[in-house]
Image (cartoon, helix red, strand yellow):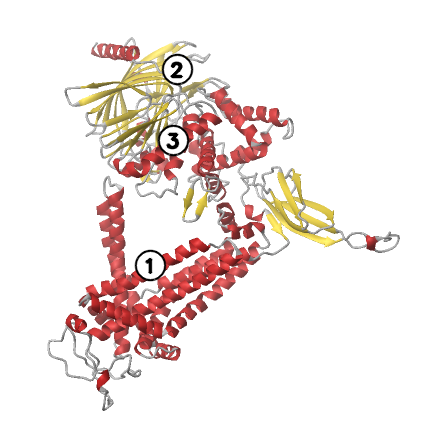
Amino acid sequence: MTPTSTLTILGQSLRSVVRRWPVALCLYGVTLLLVLPVVLALRATLAAALMPNPSAEQLIAGFDYTTFVDLMANHKGAIDFLLRSVGPFIFVTIVLHGVFGAGVVAAMAGEGTAAEFLGATGRYLGRSVRLVCYTLLLSLIVLLLWSFAIAAVWSAMTAGDTLEPQYLIAMILVAVLFTLPVAIISLATEYGRVLIVREDRRQVLKSLLEGFRFVFLHPLRMLLQHGSILLAMVLLILLYWAVEGEVGMTSVGGVLGMFLVQQISVFLRIGVRVWNTASAVALVDAVTPEVPELLPVPAVVAPAVVQPAPPEIIQSAPLPVEPAPKQPVRRKTSAPARKPVRRPVRRPRSK
Amino acid sequence: MRSRIQYLLVGLTALSIAVSSQDIFPTPLSPRNANYAIEVTLDVEKKTLDGREVLEWRNISKDRVDELQFHLYLNAFKNSESTFMKESRGQSRGVSAADSEWGWTNVTSMTLADGTDLLAGASFIQPDDGNVKDQTVLRVPLPKPVRPGEAIKVMIDFKARLPRVFARTGFAGNYFLVGQWFPKIGVWESAGMRGRATAGWNCHQFHSNSEFYADYGVYDVQMTVPKGFVLGATGLLQNLKEHANGTITHTYRAEDVHDFVWTCSPDYRVFEETWKHVTIKLMIQPEHVVTAKDRYFESAKAALAYFDSWLGKYPYPNLTVVDPPIYASGAGGMEYPTFITGGSVKYLPEGLRFTEIVTVHEFGHEYFYGLVGSNEFEEPWMDEGFTQYSETRVMDAVYGEKSGAVDVAGIRIGDSEMARDGYVNMSNPKAAPIDTFAWAFPSGSYGSITYSKTATWMITLERIIGRTAMDEAMRTYFQRWKFRHPGRADFEAVVNEVVRKHHGNRFGASMDWFFTQMLDGTEMCDYAVKGVSSRRVAPPRGRDVDTVGFGSRPRLYETTVSVHRLGEVMLPVDILVTFSDGYAELVVWDGKERVKVLTFVREHEVVAATADPQRKLWVDKDFSNNARSTEVDSAAIWKYTIKALYWLQNVVQYAAIF
């Protein structure tokens, strides 16, 4: 593995996401539709509770602590349902993300049309739901056990007459310790999902376990590739904050401007999420030989499209012990979308 | 015989200290009726104190006093059965007591100057709750009463152990904050003093919520600690004496104060700056020097300057500001005469003004507690509440009315806003009246009511009677009662006097109507504008009505504004009615009726009505219902709707981790 290979994958997958922008648009639409009813209900409740009230209206001019606190404290009913909806939203989001994940993977491997995305989402619905269930169960068990370890680390590091730097180190360590299993499970689920779609696997649990195997086999790639994407996400967030600081929401124009900025920001961040999945698909493609096609394959494949992977990827890829049987390899970008194989197939395992 | 010689030596030592010590003030500022000479040695390994004390107490009342009462505060930490531990459940200021690190004071000997043993007849008493296991008050019968004007000298030997610090005093590692550490005499109160019916000792048990109350005097204290420990204390350093055994004795003298505290640690870094006549000594933890040193000095100087011009001169030549380490945070945020403990965290952003707030607040206690010696047990609002009010004055003046407490990432909160929020949004603002003994507050209500509610009603009073009158009242109260022990009636009398001077009978014969509601009541204040409307005045109809020329008259509108008193508290309230031509009319309502309906007939329609537009009634629990307009401007609603949309979209996005 070389940095170039990671850059190549990131570049390829980013181009792939840009070409398949309807996927990100669909996901953006889904999230918007998900939250919009709640938000519109909130608007109606706020309007009923607060208007016409100059106190509420003066909030347009900027944050006023006393006004804000009084409005919140004395109109709890108007916002309670919003706060109560956060928990269910998180659950629904996790499920939806799992469900649509398969569609994203399929769309990244195909043309990336909205129909393709939604069709694949439907086709893999059952397996996606099972994958989410397994992941949640596994997360629950791992995090429960892990939390004891984290608590022990925290107690050990902050016992006695501890000063701030040590508290800070302990906090960072605990955050890392907490994030690590979450990140691993998240990545394993992503790669498990890629394997399910790529090879039309029906054994979901096994695919999830292979996702873990894949992640553990390529720790540095994971760090570089997905770390880079995370960095891009952080930069987008920082960019939003900078713009928000400049524009502000202290006038009608400012509110409208920020609405646009916010929605662009959300769309871009969804794009980055899709990029993450696309890069996972690209990585699996790069390090794993193509699934042997047991169904009749096209008799002739144009030599021009039969190209070996870039040398750095070949060098970095774990090679099979036995040379893999020569198979025609099609580049995803040039080949038409292939219908997933329905029958379970064996493929040479990489080590 | 041995003990007689011992006491003679202590007496001589005390005398020699007194003679050798340099007077701080040429003439006494206070009655100086409780004077102490103390020698104490700290064992930093065992966390123990070995002390000998000579108390000279003078009876400044007209009563014969036939017994003495002493506070043994450290016995609050003796076991789980003390009143303090039962009330606090071993928790104070967010810090827990360490189960294996109890603290106590053991008086091993107590005699008069002639050797008469007093300890034999002494007994622990529990005047507040009858908890016989509480040993924080020692009653000592005297062989003969102390007559008015007479003085009595008592020699006391004591051994004490400091608890692991969780409530002001104690140790943590090699850090020591030695407060409430010596046997301390209570306050003899004559009948009539602070509204007292009969004369007697005011010497309460140590409670979880209560603080202290003592007479003024002179303290000559010799503290022996290991060499290398940096020491600071109430008063001024007089002398340093090194010993062959690796210890060093620090001699301090404090005059016209009612308590003595000291601290030592090898880790302190010491810096000094001056403000006018005051030397500010900062004893700071090394890890806080870079980030907090300037914050401490600047806020201390700001407080000194504000109080100096607002109330009067800070008379002492020194102020010691102590910065405890984070692992001894239980020692932070505490006041002692000429000595305050602050609080800081290494990574505290500048816009979070915690260090400044604590410093300003604790310095405020130098006035309301230190110089004006109110009874913190029985009237905690008179020191904590007054200080909280003073804190809001200083913080909002120095750091901004809307950013006195917080100014971070667009969130700006004034200190007075914070105080009001602490009261009106506490879990039960009606939990108890302000005028309640410190230990009698229901659990969790002491701080919000004593500190926040008092500050909130004082801001309200200031805005009702005007800042000029309020400042004069506070100044007069301070000047009149410094170095004395005022009570509620004394403060009320000053306010009534000043309000009469400035406003005559505008607010009635006295301000009792205000104080009764605020100090004795638990009800809330809430005024709301419920209805604002205008309708065109129609021409008269029916028989025998004059409609001649009605059509040629300008169009008239009848405007009706209804203001409701939703709370039980009744205060005068301004009502501002604004019309479409820009004209605004201010109506003053006494705020007594349940509903006040105002009617106007004008050529223009009403636009809005606001009760208390200047937010004078800071105790109003809900300003969001104080105004109503006829024109709907939904921009703010859209603003928060859009914000909510974005937040939820973020929740949806960030939650999609699997």
- Is residue B118 placed above or below B636 in the rendered structure? above
Q: Which residue is mark 2?
A: B32
Residue B232 in percent (x, y) is at 29, 26
Chain identity of mark 3: B
The crowd level at tag 2 (other Cα within 10 Å; few <14, some 14-19, many 20+) is many
Residue appearing at x 46%, y 55% in the figure: A247
Give the mark nearest the N terminus, 3 or 2: 2
Horizontal side of B541 relative to A343 (left or right) equals right
| Residue type indicated by callout 1 | Val
Q: Which residue is mark 1?
A: A234
Residue appearing at x 30%, y 60% in the figure: A231
Closer-to-camera residue (B113/B228): B228
Quadrant showing the N terminus of chain B: top left
**Circle nearer the viewer, 3 or 2:** 3
Closer-to-camera residue (B266/B123): B266
Residue B223 in percent (x, y) is at 25, 21
| Residue type indicated by callout 3 | Ala
Residue B96 in percent (x, y) is at 31, 39
Residue B90 in view (yes/no): no
Residue appearing at x 52%, y 23% in the figure: B476
Q: Quadrant of residue B276?
A: top left
Horizontal side of B300 relative to A151 (left or right) equals right
The crowd level at tag 1 (other Cα within 10 Å; few <14, some 14-19, many 20+) is few
**Circle nearer the viewer, 1 or 2:** 1
Label 3 vs label 1: CA separation? Answer: 40 Å
Secondary structure under the numbered disc 2 in the rendered image = loop
Q: Which residue is mark 3?
A: B300
